[in-house]
Amino acid sequence: MTKLTILNQGAGSFVVKGDLTFATISTKTLKLFDFAGISKQITIDLSGVNSTDSAGLALMIEWIKYARHHRVHIVFKKIPDQLHNLAKLSGLDNTAHFIEQPSEDTHYESLPNIDII
């Protein structure tokens, strides 16, 4: 498990590093951004995410809701394949919040194969 770190790059740009999982995300994670005072556009680069699960997707959805409440547009870029696949299941990948396809060089733990009988 890699600790979750969010780096402020300035001008509304952030880089997320580490794991976006149930083990690393807390209720405080949602409130790490003061969207109201930063910028009218927030860009979150997820290229530093090592591993993710549905908690990562839930966090993204909460950030989107929080940004809407503060009238700020939020976009995610360099989304790991695993997180992008989870977003596809909910249709979130077809929104304006995803500005790039998943990067091919992002490392993450793969989901186990599921046999449907």
Image: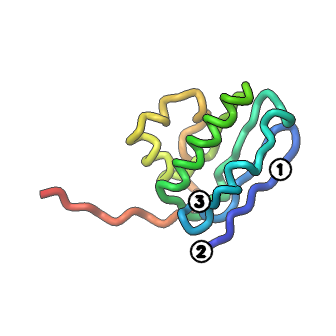
Could you tell me which secondary element the residue under label 1 belongs to? strand
The Cα atoms of the two marked residues, 3 and 2, are separated by 10 Å
Image x and y of residue 39, in percent = 83, 32
Counting the numbered discs, the total is 3
How would you rate the neighbour count of disc 1 (Cα within 10 Å): few for under 14, some for 14-19, many for 20 or more?
few
Left-right relation of 30 to 20: right
35 relative to 68, above or below: below
Q: Which residue is mark 3?
A: 20
Q: Amino acid at mark 2?
A: Met
Quickly name the residue at label 2.
1
Residue identifier under label 1: 8
Residue 86 lies, in percent from the top left, at 44, 48
Q: Quadrant of the N terminus?
A: bottom right
Q: Which label's residue is closer to the chain start, 3 or 1?
A: 1
Q: Position of residue 33 (x, y in %)?
A: 77, 45
Q: Crowding near pointer 3: few (<14 within 10 Å), some, many (20+)?
A: many
Residue that extends furthest to the left in the rendered view of this protein:
117
> What residue is rendered at 60% in x and 42% in y?
62
Find the distance from the CA under tag 3 to the CA under tag 1.
Answer: 17 Å
- In terms of sequence position, does the residue under pointer 3 or pointer 2 come before the other? 2
Locate the C terminus by quadrant: bottom left
User: At label 3, which amino acid type do we have?
Assistant: Leu
Q: Residues within 10 Å of mark 2 (few under 14, many from 20)?
A: few
The answer to which of marks 1 and 2 sits earlier in the sequence is: 2
- Tell me where residue 19 sits by quadrant: bottom right
The image quadrant of residue 20 is: bottom right
In space, the residues marked 1 and 2 are separated at their CA atoms by 22 Å
Q: Residue at x 65, y 51 (%)?
A: 46
